[in-house]
Image (cartoon, helix red, strand yellow):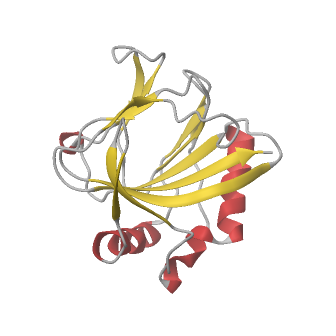
Amino acid sequence: MTPHFEDAIAAVAPFPHASIPAILSPDEAAAALSWLTFEAPWSLRTESFYEQYEFSLLDVEIPRELRDLIAPGFIDALRTFLQDRVGAPDRLDLVNASAHKLIPGQTIRLHNDFIGEEETHRVLIQLNDGWSAENGGILMLFNSHRPEDVASAYLPVHASGFAFEISPRSFHAVSTIRSGERFTLVYTFRAS
């Protein structure tokens, strides 16, 4: 399994990021979605600005056909993409790889993910077959900390990816889920 970056679109505003139309093949995405839907070991997590189900991909037994999702070659490809298209530095270490699930009524309010130098870059892989705007769960980027200051929005299209730099200005949010379950693989890196 190798991530695909064809047709990726990078931007620097409101903060460095890139959208990736088809980071996984249809078969790879279908296999990952099936596992997340029917077998994954979800645990509810509640914080001040969100409530979601999650688990670390590094702490569970992943099905053999999906182990490439955490294999060194896959992680290296994500790292190289961040360096080439999002402006990440040459030295970038994986901090965590996790899975997130949002269900109806859950949302991720406006935040920037910034916790200092512990986490500096993130890659998201969306696994949401047949998802539409009516489902909610839209990833929104903001020009500032003000909710009315939306810069752009991204539908969590199945097998798509999104990469970004984490900084004090990386304000983003996910709109409330109205129907369905929204699944995301999240790879977090640290510049070192």
Quadrant position of residue 168: top right
Residue 183 in the image, given as x and y percentages of width and height = 35, 57
Which one is nearer the viewer's eye here, 31 or 36?
36
| Residue occupying image coordinates x 65% and y 72% | 71
Residue 56 left/right relative to 75: left
Q: Is residue 173 visible?
A: yes
Q: Is residue 140 visible?
A: no
Quadrant position of residue 130: bottom left
- Is the residue 180 above or below the residue 32 in the image? above
Q: How many labels does the image show?
A: 0
Q: In which quarter of the image is the N terminus?
A: bottom right
| Residue occupying image coordinates x 48% and y 48% | 21
- Is the residue 98 above or below the residue 148 in the image? below
- Is the residue 190 above or below the residue 164 in the image? below
- Is the residue 191 above or below the residue 27 in the image? above
Residue 33 left/right relative to 132: right
Residue 95 left/right relative to 152: right
Residue 83 in the image, given as x and y percentages of width and height = 74, 43
Quadrant position of residue 34: bottom left
| Residue occupying image coordinates x 50% and y 76% | 60
Give the residue furthest to the right: 90
Residue 49 in the image, given as x and y percentages of width and height = 36, 35
Residue 91 in the image, given as x and y percentages of width and height = 82, 48
| Residue occupying image coordinates x 70% and y 37% | 117
Q: In which quarter of the image is the C terminus?
A: top right
Which one is nearer the viewer's eye here, 16 or 188?
188
Residue 90 left/right relative to 52: right
